[in-house]
Amino acid sequence: MELYTLPLDLPSDLERPIIIAGPCAAETEEQVMTTARQLAEKGCHMFRAGVWKPRTKPGGFEGHGEKALPWMKRVKEETGMLTATEVATPEHVELALKYGIDILWIGARTTANPFAVQELADSLRGIDVPVLVKNPVNPDLELWIGALLRLNGAGVKRIAAIHRGFSTIDHKLYRNIPLWHIPIELHRRFPNLPILCDPSHMGGRRDLIATLCQQAMDMGFHGLIVESHCDPDKAWSDANQQVTPEVLDFIVEHLIIRDNVEMTESLLTLRKQIDEMDDQLMDLLTRRMRVSREIALYKREHNMSVVQTERYTEILDKRGAQGSLCGMDGAFIRRVYEAIHEESVRQQTEIINK
């Protein structure tokens, strides 16, 4: 099944990145209009605001619902910006379209529920409206693709993905860790599918937004969807991750947009070197697994368990420290050796149980 690109009928002179900006939530008509006017003055063409706000816990501001939709309609009439909001039920879809919302997006919690996504897809059948799909809360690429395919199967042709990071217990830096390899794999499978980055939900802090925006551009993302509020510190929800339109304009103005130019002979030569080294890595891994299988024969003969915890810990600690000394992230080296150990255990288990 094919996923289509997302033509938004934007001005022909609009260059990458496409920016969709606006407050986390539509709080008051004055707040919506003030933010929209400030964004429009900075050249923003698409305005986002949450009308329905599904919160993690009850008791927080959950949006005004239909009451806020006329405010979005007024934004479009007075500024000319396209409007976008999140939908989670067929009723949301019906109301959003009734008030002329131009772009719909499906949130991370909804994407994680195939039943909910199918209901939304069915409600959009036969309707030509752009739909953006955020990644599910958990790092599950197939679930993300499944949501995109459900919409596409219902005839929705203007689809894009939004990468907003993935939830984890560990919140050392990011609210939702990027795990960039997942959207990269999505792009590899569907090269014509536009992918936007949501640095606000990814970082959870306004001081991280600029760096995340640049990282997204470095990876060739098509655009950004950023939370921007006229008075972020007084926002009714997610205040810490919103920036003013002025700050957003500064961030966008200083982004470095890298072109996908034709490969030069020097780059081809370097890639050839990488290919040769990858061949060498595969040869070394093959030889390492051969020794692991010999070890398995010894363990079977001497009735030893497959996993030797002390030896495994020694390898992780030693190679992690060695990686750091070689200029690599120690955690990265540990992950590499964890994967190697997992395959070694699999092969040894097969031999011991024969």
Image: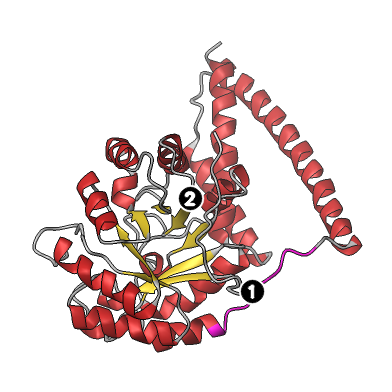
- Location of residue 264 in the rendering, given as x and y in whole percent from the top left corner: 87, 63
Q: Residue at x 55, y 71 (%)?
A: 11
Q: Residue at x 45, y 86 (%)?
A: 42
Residue 145 counted in the magenta span: no
- Location of residue 126 by image quarter: top left
Quadrant holding the C terminus: top right
- Residues 209 and 171: in front is 209
Q: In the figure, is residue 253 to the left or right of 199?
A: right
> Is residue 246 shown above or below 100?
below
> What segment carries the magenta color?
253-261
- Location of residue 294 in the rendering, given as x and y in whole percent from the top left corner: 68, 24
Disc 2 marks a residue whose amino acid type is Arg
Residue 257, labelled with which disc? 1
Quadrant holding the N terminus: top right
Would residue 313 be visible to someone looking at this image? yes
Q: Residue at x 48, y 53 (%)?
A: 160
> Is residue 128 shown above or below 76?
above
Residue 259 counted in the magenta span: yes
CA separation in Å, label 2 and label 1: 24 Å
The secondary structure that dominates the magenta segment is: loop
Which tag, 2 or 1, sits closer to the chain's start? 2
- Location of residue 21 in the rendering, given as x and y in whole percent from the top left corner: 39, 73
Would residue 241 be visible to someone looking at this image? no
Say which element carries label 1. loop
Q: In the figure, is residue 215 to the left or right of 69?
A: right
Say which element carries label 2. loop
Image colouring: secondary structure
Q: Which residue is mark 2?
A: 158
Disc 1 marks a residue whose amino acid type is Ile
Residue 140, labelled with which disc? none
Number of numbered discs visible in the structure rendering: 2
